Image: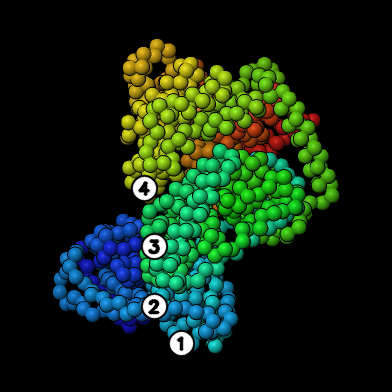
Amino acid sequence: MFAGRMLGDGAAIDPLGTTLHAPCDGQVLTLHAGGHAITLRGEGGVELLMHIGIDTVQLGGSGFTAKVAVGDMVTRGQPLIDFDLDALVQAAPSLMTPIIVTNGDAFRIVDRTGGRAVAVGDPLLTLEPLGAVAVDTQASGGERVVADVRVPLAHGIHARPAARIGEVAKGFAATCWLAKNGTEARTSGAVGLLGLGIRHGDTISVIASGPDAAQAVTALVDLIEGGMGEGVGEVPAAPIAAPPPAQPVDLPEGQLAGTLAAPGFAIGTARWLRVADIAVPVDGQGPGVEAARLDSALAAVRDRLSAEDGTHAGATIRAAHIAFLDDPELRKAADRDVGAGRDAGHAWRQATRAQAEVLRSLGDARLAERADDLLDLERQVLRELTGAADDALAFAPGTILLADDLLPSQVMALDPACVVGLVVERGGPTSHVAILAATMGLPALVAVGAPLNEVADGATLILDADNGVLHVAPDDATLAEARTRMERRAADRAAALAQAAEHCVTADGVRIEAFANLGSVEDAVVAMANGAEGSGLLRTEFLFLERDTAPDAAEQAALYGNIAATLEGRPLIVRLLDVGGDKPASYLPIAPEENPALGLRGIRVALAMPDILEAQLRGILSVQPVGQCRIMVPMVASVDEITAVRAVVDRLRVEMDITERVEVGIMVETPAAAVTSATLAAHADFLSIGTNDLTQYALAMDRGNPAVAGGVDGLHPAVLQLIAHTTDGAKRHGRWVGVCGGLASDRLAVPLLIGLGITELSASPRFVPELKALVRRLDTAACHRLALRALAASSPREVRAMAREFCQELAA
């Protein structure tokens, strides 16, 4: 393949060192999952493939360590991939490393170094541009012929299969493409094919346009299905990264399982939202014209986002979108394609999708969810460029909206008076879509998986988001029961709201504090209207993100003071800055991490940047009256972290002449904190359990990954045992324990949490009245007996069945 120049001309290096370096400045286009091959777009638009060794794809990544990621900008001489020279010598047929110019239709090699040793930085190839690349036009070849094929190749389409596909396609007059997830690449461009990231088990489209298009498609499908000698069936038959969540084996006919994104219950009619990609040409009217068009479109979208009103959640999301619009690297990538003669829309799409792929490849669910925001922006800018109509988002009353995925702008455009619920095939519970759905009061399920596609438009649905179930085409009896339940819920909600101002006390007289999780002054207003007795979690990240510098102590004090005043003296527990990992701030020097969820985040960031920590503590301590604001330390894993924060607080109290003691507590989000709760409680004034992170860390399941999201349940017996261990440890030092994670807003979880010794529940503001009403019906002794049974259960499903039966008896 290489010697025959099937991928293009170039040079080959016999490596003596252990690192592959960038031969020129450029951007990383692709990085093979096996770590052995990488492509760059370099100076002048040259596309280079570097392939370490021969047949090294068979090693499955063993011996290779990537130093860069897709989308990174690199400079000449920068390390790209480290490799174990000794191990590869023994395992690979050859270490000869080809450096290939894959777009040979745009460049010609006029000089090359050969037959001698070279060092990093020495000249290797001298290229001469051949002029503009030939424009691909469908018009010359007629209509496109398309066929889908499932890729059986064990290692997907890497360099060798890409070359074979290109060679076969050359035998036809038709122009040929492969497409995956709406993105196409010409078969004549190996880099483009590699950039599709086609893996074993993927279903792709084979496309051709021309006089012999049908024959070309048939030949390429046969070639791919035949495996090309690459090994078939040597890895699982479906991609591990994102299969649909397993539907519970005992789920009745006509029911689908999903992951709770926003609580609630709704009856409605299925309506599908299917949105096609906006068509844009590849080549433009010249760099000057296209640059001006892109400037105008970006400015128009930015102005519209800045001018729109709405909820705090919507404003936060729009601010994030504006930050993406102003990202210089994103614009630089688009400008590079515009400068090469591409249409502004095509350049913007390529730039946003490349960056979205980078976010998805980082291994962190919440960063992957931010990729949806980039795709949202892609669509908004393309509408400005093409004049395409807005997505048709007007639906009849009583609609339960179904989609393979949803964009934040689409959710913000929905009318809650007509759309009563959302069900999404993909998505994650911490996405902006989930946040918006909860803010709008729309029950929502995500990560339902491929079975959702079988639901017909117009079908009657019962969406029970609280229990993670979608009932499809229920019979008359089930539907009547659901309507009765809806009426009862509405009546219960009205009654709960009428009593929302009363204290939260169990039926046997035990005081439970009903607090609300807040992220703004607006949230505090809603919390007060719903009877919240304080705030168990004030998220402060929104003050720090989407800006160029950190807020100073005065700015923070003003905001915390406004929220405290809105709460009219009620407790306000302020969580210290929890950035890093899924919530990066541009001005904080946090290097890229292989696993952000386990890296520099939470209190680790604050302790590594003492100026940030001190400014925030000064802001909190400035709020009057002193003591209304309590301090909560996130992501604690050791005593050293809480004592370090306590020492700064005590020093600042002396400097600020504060005599009152200010409570400092911790969030229990790591199994380490739960297991050592007795030790930590000796140094903390209170403990609050963040059940979302505690669950995913305890179960080693990423709650945003559709492959496992169905198994991420805070009522897993292992999680309940960690909660029990936390309350037992806290009791030894007389400390109270609260829950500020998702379980506090889960009706089935509330009796269990009280039975385990939780005395404070901080829920979403609108759930507080129902939380209080539920607690008033509970007997703590009965809750304790339920909790003991749950601790001995074998699965979260068994626990939920126990809790559901318990709650049904309460309502009887």
Tag 1 or tag 4, which sits nearer the N-term? 1
Residue pointed to by mark 2: 133
Residue type, label 2: Val
Q: Residues within 10 Å of mark 4 (few under 14, many from 20)?
A: some
For residue 344, above or below residue 408: below
Tag 2 or tag 4, which sits nearer the N-term? 2
* Total marks in image: 4
> Dots 1 and 3: beta carbons under 8 Å?
no
For residue 20, above or below residue 705: below
What separation in Å lies between label 4 and label 1 (alpha carbons)? 45 Å
Is residue 34 at all visible to an observer of this figure?
A: no
Residue pointed to by mark 4: 593
- Left or right: 420 in relation to 341: right
Is residue 293 at all visible to an observer of this figure?
A: yes
- Left or right: 776 in relation to 188: right
Tag 3 or tag 1, which sits nearer the N-term? 1
Name the foreground residue: 281 vs 171: 281
Tell me where residue 489 appears, x and y as whole percent. 75, 35
Tag 2 or tag 3, which sits nearer the N-term? 2
Tag 3 or tag 4, which sits nearer the N-term? 3
> Dots 4 and 3: beta carbons under 8 Å?
no
What separation in Å lies between label 4 and label 3 (alpha carbons)? 28 Å
Residue pointed to by mark 3: 335
Disc marking residue 521: none
